[in-house]
Amino acid sequence: MAAAANPASLESAPRILRLVAECGHSRARAGELRLPHGTVATPVFMPVGTQATMKGITAEQLDALGCRICLGNTYHLGLRPGPELIQKAHGLHGFMNWSHNLLTDSGGFQMVSLVSLSEVTEEGVRFRSPYDGAVSLLSPEKSVEIQNALGSDIIMQLDDVVSSTVTGPRVEEAMYRSIRWLDRCIAAHRQPDKQNLFAIIQGGLDADLRATCLEEMTKRDVPGFAIGGLSGGESKGQFWRMVALSTSRLPKDKPRYLMGVGYATDLVVCVALGCDMFDCVFPTRTARFGSALVPTGNLQLKKKQYEKDFSPIDPECTCPTCQKHSRAFLHALLHSDNTAALHHLTVHNIAYQLQLMSAVRASIVEKRFPDFVRNFMNTMYGDPTLYPPWATEALASVGITLG
Amino acid sequence: MKLSLIKVGNGCRLGKIKNLGKTRDHTMDIPGCLLYTKTGSAPHLTHHTLHNIHRLPAMAQLTLSSLAEHHEVLTEYKEGVGKFIGMPESLLYCSLHDPVSPCPAGYVTNKSVSVWGAGGRVEMTASKFMAIQQALQPDWFQCLSDGEASCAEVTSIKRARKSVDRSLLFLDSCLQLQEKSEVLQKSLIIGVIEGGDVMEERLRSARETAKRPVGGFLLDGFQGNLMATEIGLHLLSSVTAELPEDKPRLICGVSRPDEVLECVERGVDLFESFFPYQVTERGCALTFSFDFQPNPEETLWQQNGTQEEIKYLDQTEKIKTTDCTQEMTSFEINLKEKKYQEDFDPLVRGCPCYCCKNHTRAYVHHLLVTNELLAGVLLMMHNFEHYFGFFHSIREALKSDKLAHLKELILRQAF
């Protein structure tokens, strides 16, 4: 199927990304995103605040950690409390009282992954609400309409999402449909001056399909591009190759947002491959299971070995949890029914992610990113023989060799 | 430690307790309340969110039921529970039990008392109890006591007598053990007044306990049934009349605003603050007015709805909570109700708390409906703020001899 003959287009979309530095060896870049609710330094990790809340931490705490952009989920918010109410509350910013930037996804991924009865047609995704059983259609137009009501700074096109483990003609169908849906989203977008609509590159794990998608979507003058359809069940080997292919064909002067990626190693490698923005529920979700992220991996603080460990989670970490509390106290608190335990870990894990990206960025600006990567890998895995082969390969492909 | 009374009248005491703590430089106002904690942390709150709250009590209440099982850890830690929980600057009072979760009766013996923690029952003799206190090093701690006389519907005189005898024996053992402990020299033992609903035993308990070198007194067994009756309240007055004026009187299990005032009028100084926690757990926000000197233009309905609404509010609405099935009171609103879905007012107009300054009823409603953790955080901040504000108003009312106004205002809202 040919791509749309007349791609709907905006007037030349503003360049929201200003590049500050580039790694001389890899594809890593450091920059600044200029968004309606302030500047965001890149590379950036965006914590996920699904239902207009960053779980148990307040907007003030999130701000104090240095977070300047986080996510909201259109699917969830579209159902509860609904776009009309949020509009009355002066948008999602007003509703949750967040003064910095927000990015909302289209709702497409959730509907396919969460809902038992969802059906994709050319029109859109038809689904049944898990709360009241009502059937409705999420079309590209509807998704943009809801996101317009939410008022987020970056909005995502509705894409036809297919699991990365699916093969065959469905992948191709979804890729071409995503292009058509991109054009419909662009046409339906009411507030291009206030909200930045990003395209989402699809094509699964097929290099040809992905290349086609890249070629077509980059003809549309959108402010930024996301790399979608990955971070599912695919092998890491296939994963990095698709990321690398995507970044090699995406314009340099626009941000590259890799969706659903948040494990530390993945972040570092994908920055090397040329990605600027990331989101993932992992750090905040794992916190609520008692797991604290550290440079060497993670600490399962509920385990008995931490019962009498009077050191902080990470002595180098500057977050409030590490400043005030020991592993032993958190261990005890995690075994109680006081939710404060979860909040302490959520604070720390977000701080860990943000501090990691900050350190990555500083190393790019100071022209020592490859050394940073080597150090990072060494701390995380110890022996080079324990380095994940995919990471070694991926880094080598962009000129970073590990010891 | 020095308790100075500024005013005494109509059974009430207004004053300050000075030279508190290991450094002897903390002060507490009375009447006042203690910060309620679970396993050494205010419920739902981290240091940051806790310190968003104004008028935080100078003293926090820890419960032995949540900490006894961590005895070994604390002993190895050596530096005391205050530092362990990240509250090194706070005064600490350690009670036996958690006022919110009543413990099963029938486990007190002549030699031991049991508490229930996350890991199950911890049985303590006086020695074990004092060993745990050595590891905790609180500023004040409730002495090991037999509180079960008040558990039954009607106390037998025999059981009441036993509760007093045992508690005095425990007290004397603990005082003896304290003498031998260097680390506990700076801690004060709070003597526990028992005796069920038997006047003679209550008086005996008060007089005998007052003879010992305790730091203060805990009035145990007045929660629940006893508080609700004239006999119970009379018993309370009779007990406090026997106690020295220069030592603080604490009461456990009493936290509702109307009950607090009844106790203040009967010589009680310090209260637990678990009521705002219970309100939080049922998804409610405290909204009762304690403005006993209102601006003539403002009326009650601005905060609680119209007079008609208040009148017909279903008082007996039962709402399940995580800790217990508690009845909602008329001091609060239930944010889960559909009518708050589009209400963009703060929880309470004019409230200076973080939640009211930053969020709306509609937002809190949304968080409750979607089962989000932030609901508990925001409600706890508001409910503590509101409650500590209430205690401030008690002190202000006493200062200006207007406690009767405040009491009338509170009772009007309690029906």
Image (cartoon, coloured by chain):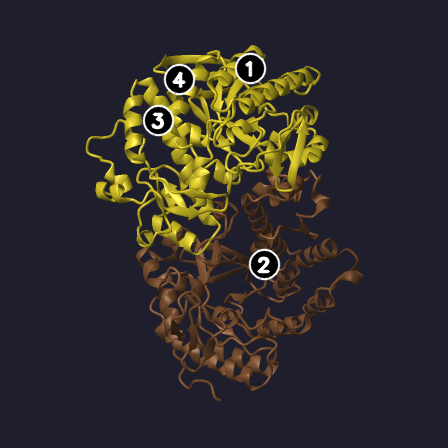
- Examine the rendered structure and indicate whether residue B90 appears above or below residue A228: above
| Residue bearing mark 2 | A282
Which dot, 4 or 1, sits closer to the camera? 1
- Which hue is chain B drawn in? yellow
- Which hue is chain A drawn in? brown
- Examine the rendered structure and indicate whether residue B383 appears above or below residue A76: above
Q: Are marks 4 and 1 on the same chain?
A: yes
| Residue bearing mark 1 | B209
Instruction: Tell me the number on the disc at residue B393.
Output: 3
Tag 4's secondary structure? strand
Residue B265: percent from the left, percent from the top? 37, 20
Q: Relative to the observer, which residue lies in front, B182 or B241?
A: B241
Give the left or right position of residue B143, taking residue A157 as reference: right
Quarter-of-image position of residue B348:
top left
Residue B225: percent from the left, percent from the top? 43, 31
Chain where mark 1 sits: B
Residue type indicated by callout 2: Phe
What distance separates the C-alpha of mark 3 from that of mark 1? 32 Å
Residue type indicated by callout 1: Thr
Instruction: Tell me the number on the disc at residue B14.
Output: 4
What distance separates the C-alpha of mark 1 from that of mark 2? 56 Å
Quarter-of-image position of residue B40:
top right
Tag 1's secondary structure? helix
What distance separates the C-alpha of mark 4 from that of mark 1? 23 Å
Q: Is residue A192 visible?
A: no
Is the C terminus of chain A in the top left, top right, bottom left or bottom right quadrant? bottom right
